[in-house]
Image: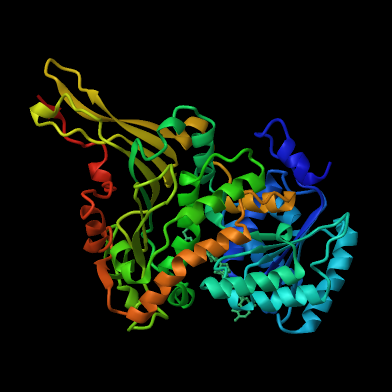
């Protein structure tokens, strides 16, 4: 039985499977993502004894580290996180490095020789997992050369896989171009388009909650759900990534990928199995059902904003335009709110409101399923408006979910209150789940593509957003709404819902659980 069949057919799905012999080759090995996320995740897998026994990590970048210097850099960073010196020393015995330029054949000759050597030393059976963690403008160069030097070829006993970081292109045409180039050298089964939101425990739990419980499915449709709200709010600004963000903007950075993943997981039909094709087929079907945005109506469905100076957690923060490496006349959006409609039987008429932004009031990612009013309120004659029931999937930071229901408050009067039934992951399970990159790196080594984005889904998602990007490029500053850092975004994002007689769920800490009692 091959690794993937073994992985997917295992009886006990709780059991972690240690992949067979594998190597990881990271391009962009001197970068932020590598040091901040990839190395710590691989190191943690090593500590948990989840890395294959036959394993090595090879870093590739232009920076001229010697192997010793690169190992020392890793060691220093892990020590900063108070990791154990002895375990680090064992780990870095498996770490190697080569430097060179991505458009230079000699880098790939060096790479090939090094892989030949390391495969023999570590007995890794020529199983190569390449990770593209460079700026996206060099992806094509790397892929072409890997192809040219036969490093993308698989044999019966060895694999060659590529993990590609976002952004995967910048619009429909460029992503298609990149995809076509990839497919010249690789089959779809070799391509792992990463979206780290899919590796988050609570994102995976959306499927478990929906499809492992009978109670939700009967009410998971237009008959009972009034609207769905997805919020991904960050307090951070662009930090040191202004160069990238000025090219990308928030729609490309968060909506085209992470937000669409959340939306599809909430809205897709039940897959026939957990098998990757089944799950990804359903996601694609759902994306196809999203009503396309007509260019002339885009402003009715989208609000884009940019932050100006304000206060976050009691500290003054500058406007986006004043951040380092940002064009002082930039019209790049740091906030987007949008309304989506899904043209299928299940979701007919149910709006999905999505918003994401930088420098918002607090960091929170949640999906709120807001249910319809009761068909007939026996409390209406007492002037009581009942709060709608809501199921909140808390993705981060307090992972879990909560159900808001109406209940009688104890006492002689008839008094209604909104009661919150809370489930908190950390409190219940008493341990933190793996970081998203740990999960995804492990899955890629196991050959499980379920939590990676398939080519067709990527294409449809870009198709949805490309007209919006084009419209904003034409309109430039016109239509860009300014919002104060430390708020929940521009007022127009509230109007997007109020014109439908709805409102965003209040996400201020203070208001949580302080719903007014209704006495009658
Ligand atoms: N950082 C993050 O949090 C996230 C990053 N990503 C994506 O991951 C990828 C890597 O991100 P990140 O690590 O932040 O990127 P960096 O900007 O840190 O770049 C990574 C490395 O690539 C090399 N590099 C920089 N510019 C060039 C260039 N013009 N040509 C060739 N190599 C270059 C540098 O190494 P050297 O000079 O040594 O070659 C650098 O260390 C990007 O595609 C990014 O969009 C996705 C999600 C989050
Ligand atoms: O991919 C990205 O995600 C982060 C937010 O990720 P999270 O795991 O902290 O929610 C975002 O800050 C960044 O701009 C974007 O590129």
Answer whether residue 403 is visible to the viewer in this image. yes
Given residues 301 and 308, the one toward you in this image is 301
Rendered location of residue 507, percent (x, y): 29, 48
Whole-percent x, y for residue 377 in the image: 19, 27
Judge whether 90 appears above or below 140 on screen.
above
Q: Residue at x 75, y 84 (%)?
A: 104
Residue placed farthest to the top in the image?
Answer: 412
Q: Is residue 4 above or below residue 22?
A: above
Q: Is residue 154 left or right of residue 257?
A: right
- Residue occupying the point 36% across, 75% down: 472
Which residue occupies 50% across, 51% down?
286
Say whether residue 78 is visible. no
Tell me if residue 258 comes above or below residue 135 in the rendering: above
Q: Residue at x 18, y 26 (%)?
A: 416
The one nearer the camera, 428 or 441, is: 441
Q: Point out the image quarter for the C terminus.
A: top left
Residue 429 on image: x %, y %: 52, 32
The colour scheme used here is rainbow
């Amino acid at each position: 039985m091959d690794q993937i069949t073994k992985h997917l057919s295992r009886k006990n799905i709780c059991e972690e499977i240690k992949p067979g012999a594998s190597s990881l080759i990271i391009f962009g090995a001197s970068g932020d993502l590598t040091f901040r996320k990839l190395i710590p995740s691989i190191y943690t897998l090593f500590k948990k004894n989840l890395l294959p026994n036959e394993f090595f990590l090879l870093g590739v970048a232009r920076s001229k580290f010697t192997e010793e210097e690169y190992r020392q850099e890793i060691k220093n960073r892990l020590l900063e996180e108070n990791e154990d010196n002895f375990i680090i020393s064992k780990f870095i015995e498996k770490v190697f490095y080569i430097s060179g330029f991505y458009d230079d054949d000699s880098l790939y000759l060096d790479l090939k020789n090094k892989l030949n050597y390391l495969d023999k030393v570590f007995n890794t059976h020529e199983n190569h997992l390449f990770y593209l963690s460079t700026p996206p403008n060099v992806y094509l160069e790397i892929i072409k050369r890997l192809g040219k030097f036969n490093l993308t070829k698989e044999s019966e006993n060895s694999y060659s896989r590529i993990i590609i970081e976002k952004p995967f292109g910048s619009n429909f045409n460029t992503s298609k171009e990149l995809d076509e180039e990839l497919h010249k050298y690789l089959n779809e089964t070799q391509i792992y388009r990463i979206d780290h939101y899919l590796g988050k425990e609570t994102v995976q739990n959306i499927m478990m909650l929906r499809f492992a419980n009978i109670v939700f499915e009967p009410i998971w449709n237009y008959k009972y759900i009034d609207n769905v709200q997805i919020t991904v709010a960050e307090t951070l600004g662009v930090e040191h990534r202004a160069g990238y963000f000025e090219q990308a903007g928030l729609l490309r950075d968060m909506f085209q990928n992470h937000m669409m993943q959340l939306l599809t997981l909430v809205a897709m039909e039940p897959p026939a199995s957990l098998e990757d094709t089944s799950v990804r087929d359903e996601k694609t079907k759902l994306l196809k059902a999203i009503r396309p945005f007509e260019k002339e109506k885009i402003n009715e469905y989208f609000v884009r904003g940019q932050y100006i100076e304000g206060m976050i957690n009691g500290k003054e923060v500058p406007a986006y335009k004043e951040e380092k490496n940002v064009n002082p006349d930039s019209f790049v959006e740091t906030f987007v709110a949008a309304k989506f409609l899904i043209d299928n039987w299940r979701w007919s008429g149910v709006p999905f409101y999505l918003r994401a932004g930088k420098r918002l009031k607090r960091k929170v990612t949640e999906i709120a399923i807001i249910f319809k009013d009761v068909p007939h309120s026996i409390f209406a004659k007492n002037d009581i408006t009942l709060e709608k029931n809501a199921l909140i999937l808390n993705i981060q930071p307090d992972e879990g979910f909560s159900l808001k229901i109406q209940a009688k408050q104890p006492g002689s009067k008839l008094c209604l209150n909104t009661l919150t039934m809370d489930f908190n992951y950390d409190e219940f399970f008493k341990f933190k789940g793996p970081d998203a990159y740990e999960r995804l790196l492990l899955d890629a080594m196991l050959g499980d593509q379920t939590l990676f984005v398939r080519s067709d889904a990527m294409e449809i998602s870009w198709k949805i957003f490309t007209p919006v990007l084009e419209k904003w490029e034409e309109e430039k500053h016109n239509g860009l709404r300014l919002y104060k850092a430390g708020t929940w975004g521009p007022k127009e994002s509230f109007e997007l819902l109020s014109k439908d007689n709805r409102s965003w769920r209040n996400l201020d800490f203070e208001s949580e659980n302080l719903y007014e009692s209704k006495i009658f």
